[in-house]
Image (cartoon, coloured by chain):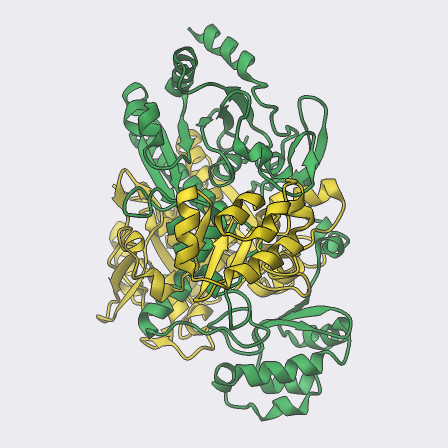
Chain colours: A green, B yellow
Amino acid sequence: MKPLADYLVVDFSQFLSGPSAGLRLADLGARVIKIERPETGDICRHLYTSNVIMNGESSVFHAINRNKESFTADLKHGHDREQVWELLKQADVVMHNYRPGVMERLGFDYEAVKAVNPTVVYGEISGYGGEGPWSGKPGQDLLLQSLTGLTWLTGNAGGPVPMGLSIIDMLAGTHLAQGILACLVRRTIKDEGALVQVSMMQSAYDLQFEAVTTYYYDGQLPQRSEKNNAHAYLGAPYGVYKTANGFMALAMGSIPQLGQLLKCEELLSYTDVASAFHQRDEIKAILAAHLQTDSTESWLNVLQPADIWCAEVLNWEELMQQEGFKVLDMIQEVTMQDGFKYRTTRCPIRIDGEVFTSVKGSPKLGQDTAAILDELKAKQ
Amino acid sequence: MKPLADYLVVDFSQFLSGPSAGLRLADLGARVIKIERPETGDICRHLYTSNVIMNGESSVFHAINRNKESFTADLKHGHDREQVWELLKQADVVMHNYRPGVMERLGFDYEAVKAVNPTVVYGEISGYGGEGPWSGKPGQDLLLQSLTGLTWLTGNAGGPVPMGLSIIDMLAGTHLAQGILACLVRRTIKDEGALVQVSMMQSAYDLQFEAVTTYYYDGQLPQRSEKNNAHAYLGAPYGVYKTANGFMALAMGSIPQLGQLLKCEELLSYTDVASAFHQRDEIKAILAAHLQTDSTESWLNVLQPADIWCAEVLNWEELMQQEGFKVLDMIQEVTMQDGFKYRTTRCPIRIDGEVFTSVKGSPKLGQDTAAILDELKAKQ
């Protein structure tokens, strides 16, 4: 049995961060009901500007909202509000990611929900925390990456490079799920609810915790290497290199040993361990030139038997052909109410040997409203 | 009270992924005892090749192991093994991140621990899952980023660019913590233990779930823009741009509206919404040239009042001077047993309005062994 079976999550959140937390709770067995505004619904349904539309809505919405239900309600309308209150009374978890103050104005904030549901675990994600001059700013992933120093850690020395995914949204989502789960543990023991708050700002900062701790001690901003950078605090060879027919990654390894294995004489003289960091640009330049003289496979065939940490660089097409990938069975096909099928990822957590999947695709806007209202009526 | 107060975690893990899960459980109130081999301990104590050594050990070790205890034991030695078994009998959670098969050979695998502690929640992180031709490969962050297609999403069109942080280690750690917490919820209700397994491979793939879902439908590999790329599936202006005195980020926004606000006539003709994606390279080139003609502040002063999603790009030095950062109080000072103090991040999750901190720094190797043995004796 999935560990959160019988738990009810009422989720007001939109876009990516909140819904990614709801997704994980759904993966783990909870019933997740999205509360969406009539007609438009979660803004994420139409978020992408790319040309990939799946069954009338954005692919990111389908990815992030598999295995959830949709209940439409106008949160400013008396009748709809009453229905939402009936759901909130029964919820184990309530979540949202509105800007600070919005739920207070709507009257669905923690204090209000707690008044009718004293042991509710109530989670919220903000962009920048509830206080200070930034609290009203838009909590958008790229802006958070840019403000928190993250973009200064990726790419080579020079300008900032953003990570090509909404990494902060997803990380804030995992933190919210962690906090909610910890409070559900406490609730089952002590029968008390909780308010769990995370912000994208704090999640972005926490992601950098090792580098930030080093910076506080060192007092110097980290410098990325001129070329082939992959981590500002790591020496050569750490990075991705072009070969004669592709790219390969090299993590840690002794420079003279690499010189011997790769038959690259110039590297043999870097016998001082400290030089791997202090002379990393020089070493990386030598490596980069040398590795272009032969194929990825040739280099790996020499390095891997010597237990040097290295790997080929693959794109998805190449990855998905690998036996090492296929055996993990990480894709599932889900089906929407109207029969539309699509393939997407599954829960990355395996419990008691079981891979957690679900056949349910993302909900059409409001598809579950009537059935949920019937259920509520039956309980009264 | 912290939600995991009174929980005991016995943690065999090393490096980053496992210890980052232990850190979060410690943040949330659990007592985390690291089991380390005598003399060398967690390899992470000496991981970095940079020149920043804090109190004799690597800064990353200090960041990731704050608020934990250290117990030394030789897992192949009879007497030490007996002591470890005494701890395992009392543990609520046991964790490790050895390669598949190692704990089985040592005799501390889930089945063995479960035999003496039937309701234990046992968590493990592997690099590539327990099966298939890759299962014995080294589970190192850069290699996982390279193999899973992640490096093809960051940076501009052309070669792969790794993210400048050990993002997969940390993500696998958050997934392990989620799985453990969900099973602790179930354990308090149903009094049953669990085996929770995650792998860096599956976490790296899960991180790309929105893009991968799009790819499965579309059948085409995503293309990053030629310049100013920040997300392969998003159109212009999404990206980071150089200005006359720094850099700024621009997320979503109508191109003609941007043209008007920025007084950039060339943008006014892109009235077709689809052009933001299809002609993004052209649009980004125009924007990139135009934004270099004035300062970041000037542009933000025009765009922010119009509710365009934009931000300045900051490094840590600049970030930490901002009031919006200071008000979040994200830094804590911790103290090691020998009096060495350092500043590091705190738990990013706030519960019931409380910011969770702890004054305890990382443990010296084996510093708690004697006290823990005394405790065990007192309980017998």
Please say whether residue A326 is visible from this viewpoint.
Answer: yes
Given residues A38 and B217, the one toward you in this image is A38
State the image quarter where residue B373 is shown: bottom left
Q: Tell me if residue B43 comes above or below residue B272 in the rendering.
A: below
> Is A76 positioned to the left or the right of B134 in the image?
left
Residue at (37%, 51%) from the top-left corner?
Answer: A202
Split into 4 quadrants, where in the image is the N terminus of chain A? Answer: top right
> Is B149 positioned to the left or the right of B338 in the image?
right
The spot of residue B41 in percent (x, y) is 42, 70
The spot of residue A323 in percent (x, y) is 75, 54
Given residues B104 and A90, the one toward you in this image is A90
Residue at (42%, 50%) from the top-left corner?
Answer: B302
> Is B237 positioned to the left or the right of B362 in the image?
right
Residue at (47%, 18%) from the top-left corner?
Answer: A73
Q: Tell me if residue B254 comes above or below residue A193 in the rendering.
A: below
The spot of residue A155 in percent (x, y) is 55, 67
> Is A298 positioned to the left or the right of A336 in the image?
right
Please say whether residue B144 is visible from this viewpoint.
Answer: no
Q: Which residue lies furthest to the left in this view?
A: B339
Please count the marks in the image: 0
Given residues A258 and B294, the one toward you in this image is B294
Split into 4 quadrants, where in the image is the C terminus of chain A? Answer: top left
The spot of residue B175 in percent (x, y) is 50, 47
